[in-house]
Image (cartoon, rainbow, N blue to C red):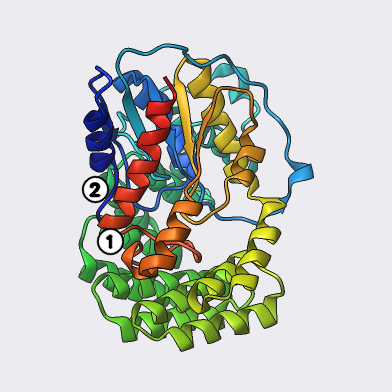
Amino acid sequence: MNQYPAKLEQELNRAGKGVKFSVIDKGVIGISSDGILAALPENLDTYKPDMVIAMLGENDSGPFVRYERLPEITLAGRMLEHSALYRAVRFMGRLASSGPLAWVSLPVSAAYAGELESPVALMTRAGELKDRGEYVQAAELYRRIIADGLPESETAYIELARMRSRKLDFAGAFKILQTGLAWRKTPLLYAEAAKAAGQLGREEEELALLSRALHTGMPLPGKDRALIYDEIGHAYRHIHNPAMSQRYFGMAVEAEPDNWYRYRNLSEAFALDGKNAQAADVLRKALQRLGDVPELYAALASLTGDGKMEEKAISMRSGMFNPLTAANYRRIRDLVLGRGKRMLCSQYPLRPLEPLRRMLGTGNGIIYVDNQDSFRSGVAREGYDAYFIDRFGGDFGHCTPKGNELLARNIAAAVLNSF
C-alpha cells in the first residue's frame, strides 16, 4: 500500500534547514492502539528518535462514551526543547517492532503468585500484564493455564498468538494456534489460525481454516459466527472476489444485526465494487435499526455528498470518544514526553482536530496536525477517489499516492515550523 513516510522524509529534507531528517517507518496494517503502546518502549530504546509522530485509534473497537467520563492522566515529564537530528518515528495507527519478541520463561512474581489459584484470577492478571505490554510475564501465566489443562486454555492460546502477531511474528502466532488446535478444534482457534495464515499471505489456507471454523459441530453464537463471516468477507476482498466478499459481509450482518461495524464492512464492499447506491442503502438500513451512529452518518455523507449529514456526524462525534483509544493515546503521550521526546499528533484526513486536542490536552508541547481543510479542498476539487482507495474509516480511507503526498506535506510543515 502506498504510505507517506518516504514522502515525508523527502519533504523534510527538501526544505533543508541544515538538518538531516530520517523517517523510520514501523507501520503494520490493522494494529490497534494497545499493540502500538506495547511496542513503543522497545522502539524508543532501539531507534532513539527525537520526535514521535502518532496517528491512531481507527482500529480500536468498543463503545464510545461522552467526554465528561474521560479521566485525565498526569504527564510524566516535559518534551525536549532542542534537537539536532529529527528521526521521526511514524506510528500511522499501526506501529509494531521490527522483529519477533524474545520469549523466555520467567517465574511469576512471588508478590502475587500465591493469589493466582483460580482460573479467573490467572486470566485477569494475565490480561492486566498483557495490556501493560509486559508480554513475557503475561505469557508465563497463559502457559500456566494451558499446562493445567484449564477450560480457559482456548483464550490463553489466542492471547499468546495475538501477542506474537503484535510483534510481527506471524509465523510464531500460527505455530501457537496449531498447538491449540491439536488440543481442541474450536471455531475461535480455527478463526485465529486463519487470521495468522492471512497475515502470512496464505489466502487459500486462510479460507480453508475459516470454513473449518464454521463446521466444527460446536455451538457457535451469533456474534462469533458473524466474526467468522466477516473474516471470510475480508479474505475474499483481498483476493479480489467482490461477489463473495459482499455475500459473506451480508451474512455477518444477518448473524449480528446490532453491530454497526458489520454494516460498514458490507457497505464498503459494495462501494469498492462501484455499487454506491447499494452501499448507501446498507447504511440507511443500519441507521433505521441502530439509531444515531456517527460513523454510519459519516460514511453515508461521504457516499452521497450530503453536507448536512456530514456536519451532523461531526457534531455527534465531537462529544464522544473511545475509552480504549483515549487511555492508550494518553499513555503514549506520557511515555514519549516523559522521555524528553517531541510528539506530533496527526488527525486522520477529513476529521476535525478539536476532538484530538480535547483528548490529549493543550499547553503540554504536543504539536497537532489538522488534515481536515486541505483534504476537503482536494476532494471538492478532484473527487474522493483522487485521494483515497477505499472507505476504511467511513468518512475517509487509505490514501492514494496523491493523498499520501498531501498528508506528508501537512506533517512536514508542522515539523519544520516547530523549530
Local secondary structure at mark 2? helix
Q: Position of residue 181 (x, y in %)?
A: 35, 59
Q: Total number of numbered labels?
A: 2
At 41% from the left edge and 48% from the top edge, which residue is drawn? 31
Q: State the quadrant of the N terminus.
A: bottom left
Q: Which residue is mark 1?
A: 198
Q: Amino acid at mark 1?
A: Gly
Task: Kindly state the secondary structure of the residue where label 1 is placed.
Answer: helix
Q: Residues within 10 Å of mark 1 (few under 14, many from 20)?
A: many
Q: Residue at x 63, y 72 (%)?
A: 309
| Residue 201 can be seen in this image | yes
- Measured as percent of width and height from the top left, residue 124 is found at 61, 39
Image quarter of the C terminus: top left
Where residue 296 appears, as percent x and y from the top left, is 59, 70
Residue 171, label in figure: 2
Query: Relative to 95, does residue 158 appear above or below in the rendering?
Result: below
Is 54 above or below relative to 48?
Answer: below
Horizontal arrangement in the rendering, residue 279 relative to residue 70 (left or right): left
